[in-house]
Amino acid sequence: MTAKEYLNQLIAMDNAINRKQQRLATLRDVAMNTTPNYADEAVQRTREKNPLENIMSKIVDLDREIDEDIDALVDFKAEVWEKLDKIADERYKRILWLRYADRKTWRYIAIALELNFTIRYIHKMHLKALAELDKII
């Protein structure tokens, strides 16, 4: 696995969490617009969940999944930081962290380094930083 593939896992994990959070928001909206049906309560039969119970169950499960995913992302970020910390050049560390963990744009990174580098030069430094991380991984 290359350094870039390794770091792209951060973005993939973050995207997965965002998708699940969007799904959760949709389920909560649906739950707010769903009313329970009490018409069949007196009839004894195999109990099926009403639509609201189904949605609430999905919300609880998805919320738990999101929490687990966030925990995994936090742990992975700590692992990534340990590896980045082994890179000697602080600028390389910052470029990789800002780009992959914080998901910043190249323009933002160029400004954040406060060294008046062009975006093109930041790209070159990024490639060098990835090469350094490849040696560590």
Image: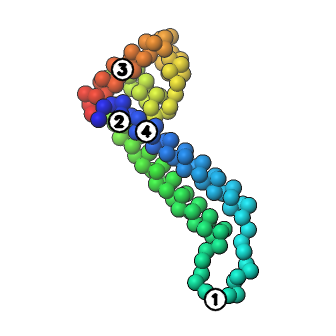
Mark in front: 3 vs 1: 1
User: Is there any visible trace of residue 66 in the rendered image?
Assistant: yes
Distance in Å between CA atoms under marks 4 and 3 = 18 Å
Rendering coords of residue 69 (x, y %): 46, 51
- Write down the residue under mark 4: 10
Query: In the displayed structure, would residue 97 be above or below residue 9?
Result: above
Q: Which residue is mark 1?
A: 44
How far apart marks 2 and 3 lie (CA) works out to: 14 Å
Residue in the foreground of this view, choosing between 29 and 76: 29
Identify the mark nearer the N-term, 3 or 1: 1
Nearer-N-terminus badge (4/3): 4
Amino acid on which the number 3 mark rests in the picture: Leu
Q: Real-space Cα distance between discs 1 and 4? A: 51 Å
Left or right: residue 12 versus residue 20 is: left
**Can you say whether 124 is above or below 43 in the image?**
above
Q: Amino acid at mark 1?
A: Gln
Identify the image quadrant of the C terminus: top left
- Sequence order check, earlier mark of 1 and 4: 4
Q: CA distance from mark 2 to mark 1?
A: 55 Å
Q: Amino acid at mark 2?
A: Tyr
Q: Which residue is mark 2?
A: 6
Quadrant position of residue 108: top right
The residue depicted at 49 percent of the width and 11 percent of the height is 118
**Is the Cβ of the residue at disc 3 closer than 8 Å to that at disc 1?**
no
**Other-residue count near label 1 (Cα within 10 Å), few / some / many at <14 / 14–19 / ≥20:** few
- Residue behind mark 3: 127
In x, y percent, where is residue 128? 34, 19
